[in-house]
Amino acid sequence: MDDFTTLIIRKFLEPIGLFDRYHSRFESQGYDCEEDLCMLDDSDLDQMQINDLTDRCEILAAAKTYCKSGPGEVYHWLRQFSLEKYHSKIVQLGYNSLCKCKQIAEMDDFMDDVEIMIPGHRKRVIRMIEKLKEGNVIISEPEQPLAIGCWMKPEPLQKAEYEFLCIKAFVKSPESDSMCIQERFMIDTGSDVVTLQPEIIEILGLNIIRTVTSHGVHSVVEKQLYAAVFKIRDVEIDIEVMKESYNSIGVCVMRHFRHYIDDQTHLWLRKCEDK
């Protein structure tokens, strides 16, 4: 398994927190190219013996929105002709997309720079680039979601009648160099608060910032609010957290992102002014 193939699997599984758990299964079963990841379905997960319903949901949601990278396009183009060993050098020289490879003019200079010295390989590269130029290749760059959620029942609410939109995200203390842990949150669009399970608040060592009065239907309860930071990819949001038996986020977090929701997935997109 070469380094770039491992990188492809990491790029796919790491954002959903499943790289350590499943990367060896993807590698051993041959699901190691971007074309495979775009087309994953239930039968593929059966083949890899991925049986956890939550993990299956998140993997299929990620597959639905997976976009090939420029270097990935180059890698698979080279691999079709058994020339992937030149991939690293080609990308280092700035030919990191098929569009750029299509613009190669001086074939001999290019192959000398890449150190393609085997005569048969040089002839093969010339044919490849000529076909590439004839094909009018267009590489689109669709927007990559910051995170992908899905419909499911979170662990504390397994007996609920309906599924909820859920997302994996990181949470940490505002203190510098603090621990950052990944948790699954239920989306609660009818609330303006963030809730965390007591044990997570304790692990993170969150500090109390104030006490508020919570008015329920039958009672009034005083609850403590803790300072924390919610993080998806490179977006960090200061939040106030309340103890609860389940983790949830409300509109106070939702409003910082754009969203696309259908019957399977929930895409978290960067706000336009942040692009």
Image (cartoon, grey):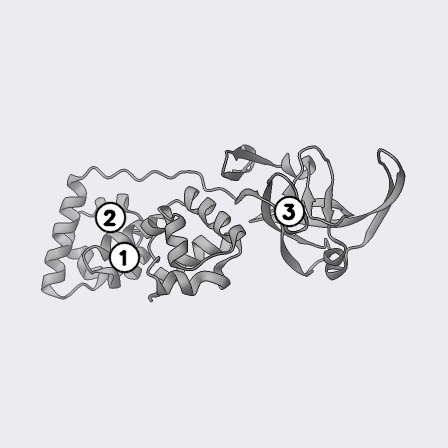
Image quarter where the N terminus lies is bottom left
- The residue that mark 3 highlights is 185
Callout 1: 10 Å neighbours few (<14), some, many (20+)?
A: many
Residue contact at pointers 1 and 2, CB within 8 angstroms? yes
Q: Amino acid at mark 2?
A: Cys
N-term mark: 1 or 3 = 1
In this view, 20 is above or below 169: below
Identify the secondary structure beneath mark 3: strand
Identify the secondary structure beneath mark 1: helix
Alpha-carbon span between mark 1 and mark 3: 42 Å
- The residue that mark 2 highlights is 101
Residue at 80% from the left image edge and 54% from the top image edge: 207
Residue 156, position as x, y percentages in the image? 68, 50
In this view, 221 is above or below 49: above
Of residues 207 and 196, the one nearer the viewer is: 196
Relative horizontal placement of residue 270, taking residue 69 as reference (left or right): right
N-term mark: 1 or 2 = 1
In this view, 232 is above or below 199: above
User: Which label is found at residue 90?
Assistant: 1
Relative horizontal placement of residue 87, taking residue 197 as reference (left or right): left
Q: Amino acid at mark 1?
A: Ile
Q: Amino acid at mark 3?
A: Phe
Residue 243, position as x, y percentages in the image? 78, 49
